[in-house]
Amino acid sequence: MTIDVHTPDCLASASDAPLLQARNSAAFWAATGRARGHRVIRRRGFLAVVGDERAGLRVLIQKPDLRREEVAEITELAILAAGPVDAEDPFSSTDLSHLGMRTWQMPIMLRQPGAVAEPAMNVVRVRSEEGLRAAERVVIAAFELARFEPYRGGEMFPTALIHQPGVDVFVVSVDGEIAGACVIVVEGGFGSHYWVGTSQAFRSGGVGRAVMVGSLAPMAGLPVTLTASRLGRPLYESLGFAATTASTWWSSH
């Protein structure tokens, strides 16, 4: 069975993907920053979320042509950061090598509006504190986020996150246990996925596909982007995503 939708005249080209990903990532991290009570800085060419010693600093490049003063401000924020520094440049045009951080690239993938298959497992939108804590634990373990260990409930996914406009958290359960999770964000008529993770005990069992399919359903009528890891790319391609351009990431850890 598929979940059919009316597909609007709202397609996106591959050349649109970096800007769509940049705008959506900024919306997601601004929402995360607000939910955590962290400072959100908005500039013409970037958005930054200034977190504490565990969450660190997150920088989202928003333009391919950052001005000298914008790069200088990012540099100062990185030097003064209380914790780890992470920067995402969907345009792969800003050089942050002077900060001495490791760097790598991942493809931005784009899915055009279209019908979505029904998930083979039980996928639900998180509405409760209990569900959010379960999703949080799955994501921290799946992405090996040592910065959030020892675990403090609500630090990564505060309860306020699921009340931010356009933000939803989904989980998939197997035999009553939360086995996978992800976050979706809809902003300006476009969607994106974040933190698509599966518990190690349930890997290679279809959990990742189920949570992707279940979370795609409410965005089936929209163009959707994501940034893919090497391991995740085959799954995303099988769901209709196509690689467009490379996004450059920088990290101090």
Image (cartoon, helix red, strand yellow):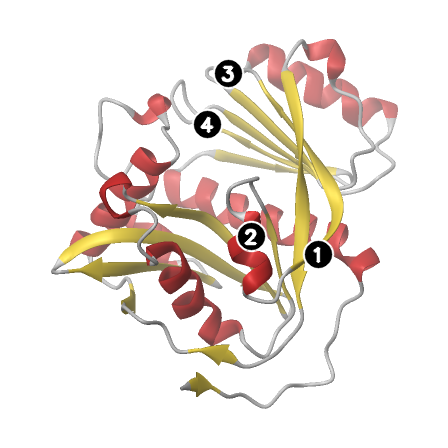
**Residue 20: assigned label:** 1
Q: Nearer the viewer, mark 1 or mark 4?
A: 1
> Could you say which is closer to the camera, residue 111 or residue 129?
111
Label 1 to label 4: alpha-carbon separation: 24 Å
Identity, as a three-letter code, of the amino acid under mark 4:
Gly
* Residue nearer the viewer, 232 or 163: 232
Residues at circles 3 and 4 in contact by the CB criterion of under 8 Å: no
| Depicted 196 relative to depicted 48: above or below | below
Instruction: Mark 3: give few (<14), some (14-19) or many (20+) Cα within 10 Å.
Output: few
Question: Which of disc 3 and disc 1 is earlier in sequence?
Answer: 1
Determine which residue is flagged by label 2. 234
The amino acid at mark 1 is Leu
Task: Identify the residue position indicated by label 3 in the image.
Answer: 253
Along the polypeptide, which appears first: circle 1 or circle 4? Answer: 1
Which residue is drawn at the image coordinates 27% and 68% (left, top)? Answer: 121
Q: Crowding near pointer 1: few (<14 within 10 Å), some, many (20+)?
A: many
Q: Circle 1 sits in a helix, a strand or a loop, which is it?
A: helix
Query: How far, Cα to Cα, is label 2 from label 1?
Result: 22 Å
Rendered image: mark on residue 51? 4
Residue at x-position 39% and y-position 53%: 182
- Pointer 2: residues within 10 angstroms few (<14), some, or many (20+)? few
Pick whichever of labels 3 and 4 is earlier in the sequence: 4
Residue appearing at x 55%, y 52% in the figure: 234
Expressed as whole percent of the image width and height from the top left, the position of residue 235 reads 51, 55
Crowd tier of the residue under label 4, counting other residues whose Cα lies within 10 Å: few below 14, some 14–19, many 20 or above: many
Q: Which one is closest to the eye, mark 3 or mark 4?
A: 3
State which tag comes first along the sequence, 3 or 2. 2
- Residue 180 in picture, x, y percent from top left: 30, 52
Query: What amino acid is at disc 2?
Result: Pro
Q: Nearer the viewer, residue 55 or 181?
A: 181
Query: Dividing the picture into quarters, in which one does residue 101 lie?
Result: top right
* Corner quadrant of residue 167: bottom left
